[in-house]
Each structure stands twice: as structure tokens, then as C-alpha cells.
């Protein structure tokens, strides 16, 4: 007797109602002989055949494209663990809490925009002449020294 395994939903419509049946042929002598097994979806009428119940169930559950996609998703998720997280732009309405240099989004009186390093003082605000800081973010860490490399 074949061991039963659980069947995956239909690969085309996702239906969980399917059938697995024996295919029996009646010979001219009136004998019935098993000619294989069939598994199919009752909704989209897709069927496949196998030599025995285990073979048929295994074929129905084989999804090479899905397996490859799942493997690629797992690879990408693992790769994402090593993607550096960059700071986000912070509006000037939320000023830094300490003095120092920060990376700033700047617009000048003529409407030109660019990013540059600017000094901020908690007491005096942004040090600028003829320009306005619209957003800021912390500077990245300095690169390692040659001794650390």
C-alpha cells in the first residue's frame, strides 16, 4: 500500500479540491488492470498521470518554478541583512540635538538646490549665508584609517 502525502493546491487556480484516482482498464477478457494513477483539479480540469499513487502525488507537488522563486527570495532576504541602512533626510523643523557638522539639503536665494556639509549650533542654528537649509542628516562615519584596513 502506498504511503499518502499531502497534496499542494492546484498550480493554476490554487484550488484545494482535487482528486487522485486509479486508472483502471478492462481487458477484452473482462479483467481489470491498473494502468496508473491520475491527479487533477476539479475547477480547471488539469490532470497528470503517474505509475502509482506516490509517483502521482510527487509529480503533482513538484513545482520547479515556485521552488526556484522561493530559493531566490530566501537568497535576496539573506542579502538584505547586509545592505547598509542610510540615514533619512530630516526636516529642519526637527533640528539636531547637539552642535556639529551635518549633511544638508540647501536652497539659495536664486532657487538652486544642492547638498553640502554645514555647521549647526543648538544656540544659533544653521551657519549659512544667502542660503537656506531645508533638510539635514548625520554625516556618515569616517572611513577606517590605513592601519585599520
Image: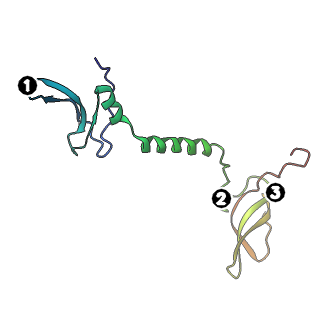
Which of disc 1 and disc 2 is earlier in sequence?
1
* Count of residue discs: 3
Marks 1 and 3, how far apart in space? 95 Å
Tell me the tag on residue 67.
none
Q: Is disc 1 in contact with disc 3, using a CB cutoff of under 8 Å?
A: no
Provide the residue designation for mark 1: 30
Marks 3 and 2, how far apart in space? 15 Å
**Residue 86 drawn at (x, y percent):** 67, 53
Query: Which sits in the foreground, 24 or 76?
Result: 24
Provide the residue designation for mark 3: 100
Which of the 4 quarters of the picture holds residue 94?
bottom right
Which of the 4 quarters of the picture holds residue 115?
bottom right
Position of 8 relative to 102 (above/below): above
Residue in the image at 9% along x and 29% along y: 28
Provide the residue designation for mark 2: 90
Q: Residues within 10 Å of mark 3 (few under 14, many from 20)?
A: some
Say whether residue 35 is left or right of residue 66: left
- In the picture as drawn, the residue positioned furthest to the top comes out as 1
Residue in the image at 30% along x and 31% along y: 56
Amino acid at each position: 500500500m502506498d504511503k499518502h502525502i499531502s497534496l499542494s493546491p492546484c498550480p493554476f487556480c490554487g484550488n484545494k479540491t482535487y482528486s487522485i484516482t486509479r486508472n483502471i482498464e478492462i481487458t477484452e477478457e473482462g479483467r481489470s488492470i491498473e494502468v496508473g494513477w491520475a491527479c487533477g483539479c476539479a475547477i480547471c480540469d488539469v490532470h497528470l498521470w503517474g505509475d502509482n499513487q506516490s509517483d502521482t502525488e510527487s509529480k503533482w507537488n513538484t513545482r520547479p518554478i515556485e521552488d526556484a522563486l522561493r530559493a531566490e527570495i530566501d537568497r535576496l532576504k539573506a542579502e538584505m541583512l547586509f545592505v547598509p541602512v542610510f540615514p533619512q533626510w530630516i526636516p529642519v523643523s526637527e533640528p539636531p540635538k547637539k552642535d556639529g557638522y551635518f549633511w544638508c539639503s540647501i536652497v539659495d536665494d536664486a532657487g538652486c538646490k544642492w547638498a553640502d556639509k554645514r555647521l549647526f549650533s543648538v544656540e544659533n542654528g544653521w551657519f549659512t549665508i544667502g542660503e537656506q537649509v531645508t533638510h539635514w542628516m548625520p554625516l556618515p562615519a569616517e572611513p577606517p584609517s590605513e592601519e585599520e584596513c
